Image (spheres, rainbow, N blue to C red):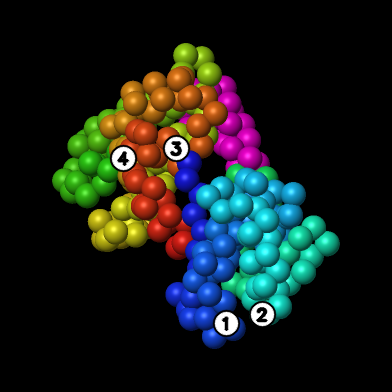
């Protein structure tokens, strides 16, 4: 899965005002991207110079980094150099924040697995939403209403069954991937009612994509929700990046 970094559009101009030349700005940009990827909290570690911008010798990069310190574009650090805290706070990420999000996601998956396990013990799940194709149907009489309710329960059980691989519940990444698809629909204006879309579409997407989800999870048990959404549900890296920015 690709990792994205971001810069202020004014970054080149602000550095130029400090006297930072174009080659030094290239070093600055690649250093920032490496720090983002490796979660260094904006620290440019001297011992890791060989791991990025391999087309410029580490010694030359060190000299350019030192020069940017004298120009107040960077600061000295006991491990090498670092971006000013206010700069990194604007368009960097902190390892502690990423670790917290990962822990929350792991807990969410664990809670979802527990919910699926409990559902399997009961034999059904009253929280699985009905199929979207039945939401807007009129109710002419009580008999037809009972027939639709019976059909909805059947569809709900069929959709819920798609979450099973053999006797084991599918990894929560599949359900989270469907959540991503639903949020993408809402973000792109496909849903006229976000609340209704979130309520009805997960079951429909489970029915439509259950086979693909089941096969992908069997072959890639450690896949993340984003990877499942790309491989099975057709979302692109750009779609996921835009969703992450809106979250």
Question: Are the two marked residues, 2 and 4, in contact with CB atoms closer than 8 angstroms?
Answer: no
Which of labels 4 and 1 is toward the front?
1
Residue under pointer 3: 227
- Identify which residue is drawn at 25% across, 56% down: 190
Question: Are the two marked residues, 3 and 1, in contact with CB atoms closer than 8 angstroms?
Answer: no
Which of labels 3 and 1 is toward the front?
1
Residue under pointer 2: 71
User: If you read the primary sequence from the N terminus, does the residue marked by circle 2 or circle 4 appear first?
Assistant: 2
Magenta-tinted stretch = 106-129
**Residue 19 placement, left or right of 211:** right
Question: Are the two marked residues, 2 and 1, in contact with CB atoms closer than 8 angstroms?
Answer: yes
Mark identifier at residue 170? none
Residue under pointer 1: 19
**Residue 13 placement, left or right of 36:** left
- Identify which residue is drawn at 66% across, 80% down: 71
Residue under pointer 4: 234
Q: Badge 4, how many Cα within 10 Å: few under 14, some, many 20+?
A: few
Q: Is residue 165 above or below residue 100?
A: above
């Amino acid at each position: 899965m690709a990792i994205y970094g971001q810069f202020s559009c004014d970054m080149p101009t602000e550095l130029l005002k400090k006297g930072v030349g174009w080659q030094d700005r290239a070093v600055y940009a690649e250093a920032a991207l490496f720090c983002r990827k490796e979660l260094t909290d904006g620290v440019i570690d001297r011992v890791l110079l060989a791991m990025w911008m391999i087309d410029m010798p580490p010694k030359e990069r060190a000299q350019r980094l030192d020069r940017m310190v004298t120009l107040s574009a960077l600061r000295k650090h006991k491990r090498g150099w670092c971006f000013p805290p206010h700069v990194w706070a604007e368009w960097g990420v902190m390892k502690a924040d990423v670790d917290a999000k990962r822990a929350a996601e792991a807990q969410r998956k664990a809670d979802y697995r527990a919910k699926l396990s409990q559902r399997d013990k009961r034999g059904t799940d009253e929280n699985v939403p009905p199929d979207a194709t039945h939401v807007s149907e009129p109710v002419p009489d009580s008999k037809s209403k009972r027939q639709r309710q019976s059909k909805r329960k059947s569809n709900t059980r069929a959709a819920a069954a798609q979450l099973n691989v053999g006797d084991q519940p599918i990894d929560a990444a599949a359900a989270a991937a469907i959540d991503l698809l639903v949020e993408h629909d809402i973000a792109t204006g496909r849903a006229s009612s976000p609340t209704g879309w979130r309520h009805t579409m997960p079951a429909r997407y489970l029915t439509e994509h259950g086979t693909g989800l089941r096969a992908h999870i069997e072959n890639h048990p450690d896949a993340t929700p984003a990877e499942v959404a790309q491989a099975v549900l057709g979302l692109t890296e750009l779609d996921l990046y835009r969703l992450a920015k809106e979250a």
